[in-house]
Image (cartoon, helix red, strand yellow):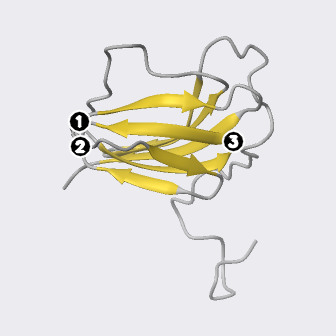
Amino acid sequence: MRAPNGKGSPASGAGRVRLGNLYRDLPPDRSAEAFDTLLQKRGLRLERIVSRGHVTPAGEWYDQDMAEWVLLLRGAARLRIEGRDELIELAAGDYVHLPAHRRHRVEWTDPECDTIWLALHHDAS
């Protein structure tokens, strides 16, 4: 392969090319939520989460050091944000950004089909 300028080799430092599909290779055991890290760098983690009827245990909250941007790819879910009365209902294509330490919990995910999330955790700065 040639470099973009048409001369020589590709730019040095080019990393390994990785291919995948967010809808394939789903975990066979659905008894627990599955968390797969797709990319991790300093200050950033991208993960696929697969839920089927899973919720945050009663009395527990997520309180994360990193901000989180979440996109729901498939399925449906309801989130509770501490201090808000209404639940956030998510369907395929919906996303939410949660600042670091914004306590939240998953109140419901569809028990009939996989709910697939793409979560980008990043430094709050």
Q: Quadrant of residue 100?
A: top left
Residue 65 — which label? 1
Marks 1 and 3: which is nearer the front? 3
User: What residue is pinned by disc 3?
Assistant: 75
Which comes before the other along the chain, label 2 or label 3? Answer: 3
Marks 1 and 2 close (CB-CB < 8 Å): yes
Give percent across and percent down for residue 44: 37, 46
The residues bearing labels 1 and 2 have C-alpha atoms spaced at a distance of 5 Å
- Mark 2, Cα crowd under 10 Å, few <14 / some 14-19 / many 20+, is some
Marks 2 and 3: which is nearer the front? 3
* Element assignment for label 3: loop
Query: What x and y, as percent, mark residue 120?
Result: 45, 48
State the mark number for residue 107. Answer: none
Q: Residue at x 74, y 22 (%)?
A: 27
Image location (x, y in percent) of residue 89? 51, 47
Kind of residue indicated by mark 2: Ala
Q: Label 1 is placed on what type of residue?
A: Asp
Quadrant of the frame with the N terminus: bottom right
Q: CA distance from mark 2 to mark 3?
A: 25 Å
Answer with the quarter of the image where residue 7 lies.
bottom right
Q: Which residue is mark 2?
A: 100
| Residue at image location 57% in from the left, 39% down from the top | 77
Tell me whether the residue at label 1 lies in contact with that at label 3, contact meaning CB atoms closer than 8 angstroms.
no
